[in-house]
Amino acid sequence: MSTDVLTRVEASLPTSPGLTVRTRRVIGAPVVALRAWLRGGARAEDKPGQALLTGRMLGEGTARRDFQRIAVDAESYGMALSAHGGFEVYGVALDALASDWELAVDWLAELIFESSFPEERFSFLRRQALAELESLEDQADVVTAWSFLEQLYSPHPLGRPQLGDAAALTALSREDCVDFHAAGRARGAIVTAAGEIDAPAVERRLRERFAALDARVIPGAPPTAPSDALPMRRRVRTRAADQAHLYMGHRTVERRHPDHAALEMLSVVLGSGAGLAGRIPARVREREGLAYTAVASVASGAGSDPGRLVVYVGTSPETVAQAERAAREELERLLTDGLTDLEVKEARSFLFGREPFRRETARQWAEMMAEAELFALPVDDPEWTILKYRDLDRAALESAARRHIDPAKLKVTLGMPGRSKKKPAEPVP
Amino acid sequence: MTRRGLGQRGRGLRRFRTLAPLAVPRLPGTAEVSRLANGLTVCVLHHPQAPVVTSALWYGVGTRDERPDERGIAHFLEHMMFKGSTHYPTGEIDHRTQALGGSNNAFTSHDATAYYFSFASDRWQEALRIESDRLIGLTLDPQQVESERQVIVEEIAMYQDDPWDALEVEVHAGLYGEHPYGKPVLGTAESLAAIGVPELRSFHHRHYRPDNAVLVVAGDLGDTATVRREIEATFGSAVAGGETRSPVPSVHVPPGVRRLERRHGEVPRLLLAMPGTAAADEDHPALRLLVTLLAGGRASRLQRALVDDGQLCLSATADLQDTVGTGCLTCGLEVLPGIEPAVAEAALLAELARARHELFDAEEIERARRITLADWVFGHERVHSVALTAGFCLSQFDLEHTERQLQAIVECDADRLRTVAARYLDPERGALLGWSMPEAGQ
């Protein structure tokens, strides 16, 4: 990475993250996208599921309105409202027609500052989350992915579903969410708006409505570090009848790591680019016809915590070993034979070429600006994006591959179908 | 129009300003439609909001055009269109797409097959070259056909393992019976085994013709005359002669509710399917609005009765297909643990009966209209979506199809909704109700 880029990254480090407001006029559809992200999602929670439920509770009632009234009011204006809890942040997303931006800003602030966390809604949402867990356990690829992430990260919070688990959810209380939200507000927030708007006017109103967040920041404690205590190979029995799911990989680097851009380029070479062009899908699907889905990345999920090398293949139980062998061989070939100059050029070209598509909509801009503030990286600056890939040549990528791809450390989770094949459904008399 | 009833609870509600009258959104950009001498319909849609271009090529062929011994061939051929042509050997389409920083994909439905590329606006012409090459010179290498057949078998397995996808395939098959809309788009492992190079070649020859296709290029295109010249130069040599399509047969669903049950996982899931309308039918917009009233947003009928207030289900959905022939209207439920599936089913049927028998109030209708229109605007922010909608409209109907639908939704009133609800929301007129039940209860 060039000194120039590094300087720009250093310069973008946050100085006062209590409240960060970003706005942007986006010429296009007459809409406005608003995002309020409170720092510290599941990575900051003491109890599994706490961040997710806290986020969802933000839409369940305020001092002024109950959940139904909030929904009716928002939908009467055609607004799309989503209260959510993620791994890095939780908060509220509100998309509205641009003409309704003042109302949207006010409602966003109301949900963040005046949520009342009604007990009966908490009970229902917790019940829903438990049901969601049960429902997701019917999805073989999801269950296998959960097990794989646990293998890689446990006891770090990336090693568990953001929904938590049944025992933890059952033990959660409304007060846990109230406390988490109080701590969340103290950790600071990022509020963004993008669309066909008068950006300075929207920024003024956002600063006014969210001024209470611009206080002293109380940073959260870092999450528990991952360990490598779990076995290298795991086999889980799923509720599927036909397909096996293979996840293979290990931890790599966080988003701000100097090698992250190199790993993004390596990901394109291996299998995160267009269609089936990467080495692993080309081998597993195009050449050997083993799978419908085969993808690979070297920096999947990189954020404040390390991302991961991950290869995923959905295939039949009879060919899963062949798929694993093929994927391993491709990873080893990358390390032993290196890359071609053409591959490097094309990976760079792909990453440059996709940039306009990341900036098409108000929603994309609102989220990209928030992401830029969250990671203190100018990801919303097209010039920075170009600079970070421009100087990475074949030698730099091969060197990064040697530092961050290690076949000896690959952990493997196999999700094998545990359900006998059923006959087609029978009509019920 | 002022908001009515919003102040009834009166607990410190902030001011509400007057809602602006509903304006029907139009497809963004400026479209010019023409036809080449070989019959290819071309839509050049200038929409320079971002420096990107999407090309979408729609062929008027889908699963419904398959013969009984060809089940799955439309989708199989869609896969093979990426597996080699005269100037783009196997893997080269994805390779070129990646090298140019673009994306591509395709899909097959019962009515159509569509291919699309998105590129930055300084290099989008590569999409024309690829599409033209595989229209005129598709290779169909036997080894690639064998390999891709196995890939599709894995795709079928993937859907079979998904509880909702598997239920949907069986419910649609059950509802439509021998009608082509009841046939699975992917075919079956057995039907695919009977399809080889000659069959794929014949299908391509019969249907992949310029006079059976619509090409849309949308985005930051520059000079229209230049774009047209490029399209003419690339596609002009393709030879017309597409097979005339048979009209979509009528759908005959016997009266009464037929039921099926399958076992999968641990969560009860219900899918109720009833015949809806063709997308061009005059009842379609009202039915679309009814679907939003039932399940569009958190204040919708099913969301309240079955999820938030009733607390019977994890989720409740409703959907309406946009098809050339009689499409399908579906309602889906995922039942919460501890709730008797029959109770959730009864609650769903009660809400459908309520929709048939009681007038929707004006505020509820207005809210559903606004949700529909706003969702349409949100859903057309990207050039990619605009291009696909234009292609869908032109290949199945005409470019004004969407605008007409939205206008009719705006004009739809409570009486019209009740009339249409009585016509289509009554399962006793013919429906297929499918349950995916927990295996543990078997």
Image (tube, rainbow, N blue to C red):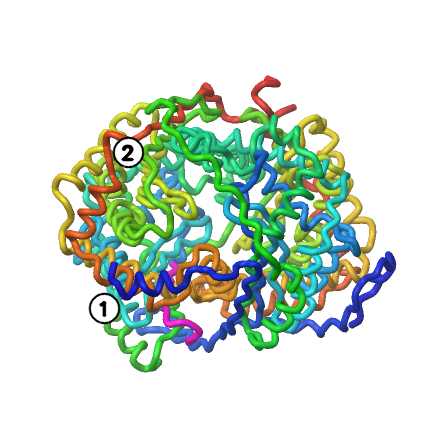
Q: Secondary structure at mark 1?
A: loop
Say which of A334 and B283 sits in front: A334
Chain letter of mark 1 equals B
Indicate which disc residue B168 carries. Answer: none
Say if the magenta span includes residue A316. Answer: no
The N terminus of chain B - image quarter: bottom right
For the residues carrying marks 1 and 2, which lies nearer the camera in this image? 2
Disc 1 residue type?
Ser
User: Residue A395: x and y, percent?
Assistant: 15, 52
Chain letter of mark 2 equals A
Q: Is residue B31 visible?
A: yes
Say which of A395 and B78 sits in front: A395
Secondary structure character of the magenta stretch overall: strand
Label 2: how many Cα within 10 Å (few below 14, some 14–19, many 20+): many
Residue B267 in the image: above or below residue B32:
above
Q: Residue at x 34, y 61 (%)?
A: A354
User: Residue A36: x and y, percent?
Assistant: 59, 58
Marks 1 and 2: same chain? no
User: Residue B215: x and y, percent?
Assistant: 37, 66
Residue stretch rendered in magenta on the structure: B46-58
- Which quarter of the figure has residue B307? top right
Q: Is residue B41 visible?
A: no
Mark 2, residue position: A290
The C terminus of chain B - image quarter: top right
Say which of B410 and A176 sits in front: A176
Mark 1, residue position: B237
User: Residue B108: x and y, percent?
Assistant: 41, 49
Q: Residue at x 74, y 56 (%)?
A: A72
Q: Residue at x 78, y 44 (%)?
A: B353
Q: Is residue A364 left or right of residue B439?
A: left
Q: CA distance from mark 1 to mark 2?
A: 37 Å
Q: Residue at x 19, y 58 (%)?
A: A345
